[in-house]
Image (spheres, helix red, strand yellow):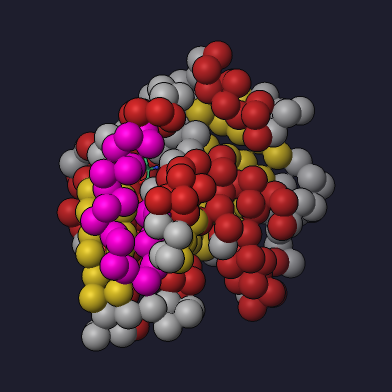
Amino acid sequence: MKIGVFDSGLGGLVVTKAFIDTLPEYDYVYYGDTARLPYGEKTSGQILSYSIEAVKFLISQKCGIIIIACNTATSIALRYLQQRFIPEYAPDVKVLGVVIPTVEEALQNGASKIGVVATNATIRSHIYQEELLKINPDLQIKEVATPELVPAIESNDFARAENFAKEYAKEFENVDSLILGCTHYPLLKDFFRRELPFVQIISQDELMGNKLSSYLKRHIEIDICLSRNHDYKFLVSRWNTHYQQVAAGLFPSFSIEEVSANV
Ligand code: DGL
């Protein structure tokens, strides 16, 4: 069995790189639904049905553990997938998301004021607020939707992304930690760190590798089923040369292929 990683597009490759850097010997299948990005602007019903389709596809690719790297899909679909879909469809498969590990990281240093930036759909779900308050009901939380950032990053226009990010950063001058709750935002982490030098910036590319590694250590029953041939596959629902360049920047010797995820 392989490790599957699902994102709405290519942003999740940054987290996949963290997995591969930490655990290079395993076999990975990445699936990015580039044809339907951005999920952050879709309805909850759409996000749920796309996420089910992607998970079914990764199961058909022999993935025994699937990480939903997309914060939006995690927010809207993870609970349904874990509690309803997987127990009936593929009870031996594990599906994990990015929200809980991120929340744990944000609370590690005793923060009491936490900020969250994410897509419209993630903020609308209030998943970060809900999970943070479950751990510490006294926290002060500020959630802000930052919908301009993904399109600017997708079009490689970092000057525009940073202009928007500069305005957003002003809202978080008084927090202890700021969660970058979107696959694309690790690409702006240095910018946020410069703008907010006294705030701990939580960037998923820096934490998810260790989180997966410790999960596999705690779940030997899953770990022993995972193959280890250093085999990495990168699949998308729509291919173009720009995507190929982005992927090549992170994984120079691998190409991405277009697939239909309809199984
Ligand atoms: N992958 C999405 C997330 O992490 C961002 C891009 C999108 O809106 O689809 O929330």
Above or below, comparing residue 188 to residue 76 in the picture = above
Q: Residue at x 76, y 28 (%)?
A: 253
Residue 132 counted in the magenta span: no
Above or below, comparing residue 208 to residue 32 in the picture = below
Q: Residue at x 45, y 60 (%)?
A: 197
Residue 241 rendering spot, x and y as whole percentages = 55, 14
Nearer to us in this view, 33 or 192: 192
Q: Residue at x 63, y 52 (%)?
A: 18
The magenta segment: 161-181
Nearer to us in this view, 43 or 124: 124
Residue 110 rendering spot, x and y as whole percentages = 42, 83
Residue 4 rendering spot, x and y as whole percentages = 57, 48
Nearer to us in this view, 261 or 147: 147
Res. 33 image quadrant: top left
Q: Is 142 left, or right, of 20 in this rendering?
A: left
Q: Quadrant of the C terminus?
A: top left
